Each structure stands twice: as C-alpha cells, then as structure tokens.
Image (cartoon, rainbow, N blue to C red):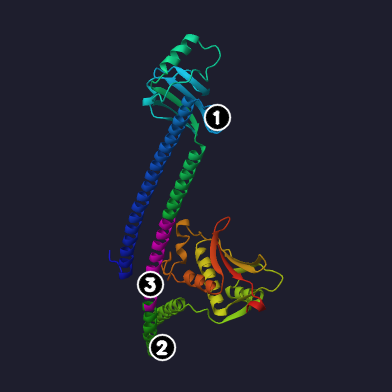
Amino acid sequence: MVYSKYMKKLIDRRSETAMALILLALISLLAFGGIFVVVVQERQRQQLLAEYRAFQLAAELQQAYDRGTLSGFEKYPDLMAFGIYTARGIALYRFGNAPQSVSPEDPKNPPIISGDIITLVRPFGGGGVMRGRIGGFRQGADTTEMMMSAIAGLGMTRLVFVSYRISSLQKGLYVLYTVALLIALALAGAFALLLRLARNLDQFRLREAKNRELVALGEAARTLSHEIKNPLGVLKIQTALLQKQLNGTELLQNVRIMEEEIDRLGILTDRLRQFLSGSEGNLEPINLKTFLPDFCMRYDGRVKLTRMPESEVPVYIDRTHLNQVLENLVQNALESMADRAFEPVELELVLSHGNTIHLSVADRGAGVPDSLSERIYDLFFTTKTSGSGLGLAISKRYIQLAGGRLFHHKRDGGGTIFYIELPLFTAKGA
C-alpha cells in the first residue's frame, strides 16, 4: 500500500505518541512504587515511635513504682493498663486491665498494635530495694504468693506490661494513607487524562492528514474541471457544426449522442466545481409557502405538497442552491420508485420549535440500507450504475452553508424521508 507523505508523517507522530505514553506509564509505575515505599517506611517509623513511647512510659512508671511515688495515673490519660511482674511472670503490681500473669517469653515478642492501642512486655532490672507493698493486687490474693512475689522482686529482673493508646500516631497514619491515596488518584487521573488527550491528538492528526489530502485533491479537481471546461466548449461547437453538415443523414443520431455525453460531462464538471468552491451563493429571503407550490408544478403531478403552515415561512438561502437540493432529492425519490407502482413524492413543510423549519421529501422506494446510511452523503459515492455520487454531497453542503442540516430516516410502511432543516429567517438576522 502506498502512503502519502501526510500519512507517513502521521504514522511517525503516532509512534512518538506511543513512546511518550509508554514512558509516562513507566514514570507513573515508579511514582506508585515510590508512594508505596514511603507509606511502608512511614508506617514502620510510626510503629517504632509508638513502641519507643510505650517503652519510655513503662520505664517511667517502673521507676516511679520503685521510688514509691506512683500514686495515680491522672497525668497519663492515654494509659490503658500497667503491670509489673517477676521474671517468671507473677504479678507484683497491676493497673487497669493488666493481666494476672505474663509469660517469660513475652519480652521476645514484638509489640501488639490493635487499632490505636499498643501493648508490650519488656524486661527491666531491679533499680533498688522494693517497697514493702503489693500495690495493685485484687482482694483475695494468696498471702504465700504475695510473699514469694515480694522476695522475687528484690533486686531481680522484672517484666513490665504496658497498654497505651496511640491515637495521635494513628491519626498521623490515617493522614498519611489519605495523602498517599489522593496522590495515587491524582496520578491515575493525570495518566488517564493524558491518555485521552493523546488519543484525541491522534484522531486530530488523522483528520488533519485527511483534510490536507482532501484539500490537495480539491485543488487538483478544481484545476482539472477548469481545464476540461474549455475542451468541452470546443467539442460542443464542433458537434453543432457536424449536426448542420450531417443533417438528413444516418450519422446525425451519432452526433446527437456525442452532444448528450458532452452535456452530461459538462454538468458533472460544473457540479464538482460548485461543490469545491464552498461559496454560500447569493443569499436572499425565500418564502417557502410560495416557492414550493411553484416547484411542484414542474413535475406534473409526480410531486405532491401534502402539508403547509398557514403563515409565511421565509428562509435565507441561495435560490439556485435550494432548487438544486430539491431537484436532487426529488429525482432520487422518483428513481427509487421507478420499478414500483406509481405514487407521488410527498413534500411536507412544518415549523419546529418556533424558529426552525423542516422540509421533508418522502418516497416509497426500496429505502437506504443501514450499512450505507452515512456513506450516501460522501463525495463520489453512489449506488446507481449511472450516478455521479455528487447529488447528496452537494445538497448537504449547500444546506450546511445556509446554516441548516440534511438528514434522513426510514419511512413507516417502506421508503425514505429526507429532511431539510433550516433556520427561520427574521429581518434582524438578515
């Protein structure tokens, strides 16, 4: 397949866009990975900080216990439980929901964090002679156990249990998670937006390449139609001379066929030049209420006007363009019903939404296949063996130049309805 230079440039640019998207995806993955690493490290740091604060509190409370100054816990509002135990885990002092005993293996275990509560057991060496009291025992404790606990506590390693609320640290973690999530969502949104912009850019470049090719094709077609026009004029003159010289002979019919083909080629050239010109023509107010009856009279009953508003219906369009559009639509409708029982083409004019008119051209032909519904307005596309593929393309162009649109629908009971939608003309908008 041979590509034009515009398509080659488009392919190169799309390759650059794909590489940029791949690079952006890698950067996004690295960013997500960085966010994950930061969150994990910060979570570990917060846990270490929470463990350190709980350890500090355990040491402070243990020292206060040894000094005999542990009288209350009002200054520790986040303390949930505190206990001092012998090396074998027998309780010497308990506060809050501290357990009756702990395992000698508990100090080897990492702290337990449940929600916003951290719980740990750590060993501390005896810092002095223990005071002669067991400050937190519940009533009913065995006296022998109390004595054994007191003796075991003299200058020996003790285990300290602390359960501590770390709400502030947990709030910090929640803030961290929220910020990380927002950053991740922002990155994902930015990537999705850039991906969409890249796709739109590719589509825009594709349309631009096609438009450039169409412009180049249009210039070539305009030049070609101009160059063809002059030889056609010469051929027209020569056929006229031949008709005079061959009058009364059998060859006259052949010359007339040549003249018909020259005329057909001239009409095709004129239509193509009109389509490529893009001119609005000579815009003028046209009252459809008087225009349409005169138009229908040309077809000797083959076109019927079925509905018309009571008031005047002015539109602002070139008269020649409007005639050509209606002629194209009516001719297509008549050709679609050529092999069917005669039924006139129906024209209907209605007002829509107060400032728009709908002029419909309805037939009972075979209809437009769904697969060709959009293509029938393309330039040079036709389903007829002798068609040029210019009629609907030119008609749609003329209606768009007048500020309207041309479209079609299937007709109930068979056939097609083409709609011409135009703005209602007002003196202010002239």
Residue 19, percent from left and from top: 32, 58
Q: Give the Cα distance between marks 3 and 2.
A: 42 Å
Q: Residue at x 49, y 44 (%)?
A: 175
Mark 3 packing: few (<14 Cα in 10 Å), some, or many (20+)?
few
Which residue is disc 2 drawn over? Answer: 240
Residue 174, percent from left and from top: 49, 42
Mark 1 packing: few (<14 Cα in 10 Å), some, or many (20+)?
few
Q: What amino acid is found at the position of numbered circle 1 in the picture?
A: Phe
Q: Is residue 225 left or right of residue 137?
A: left
Q: Give the Cα distance between marks 1 and 3.
A: 84 Å
Residue closest to the eye, 407 or 325:
407
> Counting residues from the N terminus, which is met first, the one under dot 3 or under dot 2?
3
Residue 304, percent from left and from top: 62, 68
Which residue is disc 3 drawn over? Answer: 212
Q: Residue at x 38, y 65 (%)?
A: 206
Query: What quarter of the picture does the N terminus occupy?
Result: bottom left
Answer above or below: position of 38 versus 263: above
Q: Give the Cα distance between marks 2 and 1.
A: 123 Å
Question: Mark 2 or mark 1, which is nearer to you?
Answer: 1
Residue closest to the eye, 298 or 251:
298
Q: What amino acid is found at the position of numbered circle 3 in the picture?
A: Arg
Which residue is disc 1 drawn over? Answer: 73
| Residue 145: image tag | none
Q: Which residues are magenta?
A: 193-219
Q: Could you say whether the residue bearing mark 3 is in a helix, strand or loop?
A: helix
Q: Are marks 3 and 2 in contact (CB under 8 Å)?
A: no
